[in-house]
Amino acid sequence: MRAVDRRILQRIRRRLALLYGEDVLERLIQRLALIVGRYGVGVTCPDGQVCARWDQRDAVLICYGDMLSAEHLGDLDEPPLATLHKFLRKHVGDAVSAVHVLPFFPYSSDDGFSVIDYRSVDPALGTWHEIQSLGEDYRLMVDLVINHVSSQSNWFRNYCLGLAPERHYFIEVDFDTDLSAVTRPRTSPLLRSVQTPGGERHVWATFSHDQIDVNFANPDVLFEFLDILLFYVHNGIQIIRLDAIAYLWKEIGTSCIHLPQTHEVVKLLRDLMEMLEPGMVLLTETNVPHTENVSYFGNGDEAHMVYQFSLPPLLLHALSTGNASYLTDWANNLEAPPPGCSYFNFTASHDGIGVRPLEGLLPQDEFDALVAAVEQRGGLVSRRSNPDGSVTPYELNITYFDAVGVPGDLDASIERFLCSQTIMMSLQGIPGIYFNSLLGASNNLAGVEETGRARTINRQKWTESELAAMLSDGSKHQARRVLPEYLRRLNLRRERPAFHPDAPQQVLDLPLGFFGVRRDAVDGAERLWMIANLTDAPLSVAMSRLDRGWKRHRWSDLIGEWVQTAEELSAKLLFEPYQVVWLIAEDQPAEALPEHEDGSGETE
């Protein structure tokens, strides 16, 4: 283990004092030393060297541990985690560098996000051996479900029995307390009634009555989670996703979201990781309006990555309408992340498409039309309660393939879907790809009917034989066409320095039906243009809008696999519906330069 950086230790001391007071500070520092000593975590790079957290080869696959399972063979069943690993090695390879295995712990509801035991692997999925084996080929991301625990956990059972220390782990509130200021992500009642040795108590439950919020005002709770965090590090986890972190700290009379203490806890976790494992990455999950979301970068001292939650609904709107103006305006106003930080770009995950991040970005009539379009394509709409008693949509439940699809036209649906995914992986940051999107999965309506939960629509799972049939020669399933092309583009991407997460991004000024960005490699050695036609009609764009000196270069499209000199290339670049290009400009030999090499006089 490396020597402790005293500057980081001082920051940790300040944060603990701010959260819990100077009078208990030394005791807390001693507890921290005991936890660190217990796990003896090492470091991912030697002292004195800068850890490279990411580069253009990085992409994260998001999946459940049982998204893929072997056939039932009695006692010879292969653990689903092993089946998943086998599929990734055979079909995906290096196209992704990391795997986010969604909660793989014993749980009681919410498909894993109501954790019973944070230190065990659900036996139905496998063991820590399978997790560690997967980690030999891929970096692993794991959820630290930090806001709440299962009502069936030992913590909550001991609370109900009045046993220490857990009897102080949860938030008790008088039933008559005015909680109208609290921001609610769900429509369920905020308080749950439980019986304890002291009588009836009402405990805080932000998301459901099976998910009981823990009390971070008690330092014992913080140290329980610090211990869990280092246990994960000890088991090879390199990326920590802080689930529902925005609601962590509660203070009656406030909104109980994004409180200063919550940010301080995230910074403390960042400090601990910097001190012990500088190559690790901390990702915050805050499905809220954009300005609130990026606040978790802090001053470059908080999360290493934040989700681009506004991207999925804005991109869906742009492709649904052929109007990229709102997507372009948002991208134009994106601030570059602080040094050492990055965006986590995605279009789909195990949850639905969050729409709170559209607040302030899309007019109400456009928003209403988007919701209606999703419902017309077989999707569902989840709603939340507002302080005034009204309910509004917070999530669109639909697979992204069906969301952007063209009903009755599979070819157009595939092209439009691949367009959406290519735009996502072209933006500054690290791409996250949901397993179902990798296959171009359609809505799982039968699953919704079975579970009664809207989110099941995007959580379909397969057996090996089902997936093999989908991918076989002659299969008419869209996965047969989506998967190989998706992987081809990911593999192209990982070879280009211009796609490094730190490579700057410039949004292009293009006609209404186009969206485009220019990426410049960190060392300036490569420049790449991503341009996408978001409409169902052929369009063209003048080369001079990309580069006034376009005639000085030889141009190539990595996706279309063509190379042309300026003399061979038309002054206008033609696009088929939903076509995307990755253009690279290379200097031409002097003798090949056209007579009017400055591109002057070129118009669209």
Image (spheres, rainbow, N blue to C red):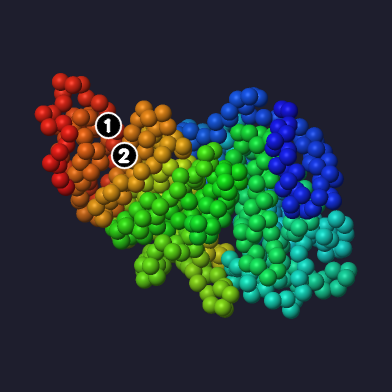
Could you tell me which residue is drawn at 40 percent across and 52 percent down? 333
- The residue where tag 2 is placed is 529
Tag count: 2
Amino acid carrying mark 1 in the image: Ala
Residue 78: image quadrant is top right
Could you tell me which residue is drawn at 85 percent across and 45 percent down? 27
- The residue where tag 1 is placed is 585
Considering the image in quadrants, where does the N terminus appear? top right
Could you tell me which residue is drawn at 19 percent across and 47 percent down? 540
Nearest to the observer: residue 1 or residue 197? 1
Q: CA distance from mark 1 to mark 2?
A: 9 Å
Residue 566: image quadrant is top left
Q: Report whether 288 appears left or right of 237.
A: left
Q: Report whether 504 appears left or right of 576.
A: right
Percent position (x, y) of residue 443? 44, 59
Could you tell me which residue is drawn at 50 percent across and 57 percent down? 291
Rendered view: 246 above or below 518? below
* Earlier residue among tags 1 and 2: 2
- Secondary element under disc 2, as helix, strand or loop, is strand
Q: Are marks 1 and 2 in contact (CB under 8 Å)?
A: yes
How many neighbours does mark 1 have within 10 angstroms: few (below 14), some (14-19), or many (20 or more)?
Answer: many
How many neighbours does mark 2 have within 10 angstroms: few (below 14), some (14-19), or many (20 or more)?
Answer: many
Q: Report whether 506 appears left or right of 125.
A: left
Amino acid carrying mark 2 in the image: Trp
Percent position (x, y) of residue 120? 72, 45
Rendered view: 150 above or below 542? below
Q: Report whether 546 appears left or right of 107.
A: left
Percent position (x, y) of residue 573? 19, 42
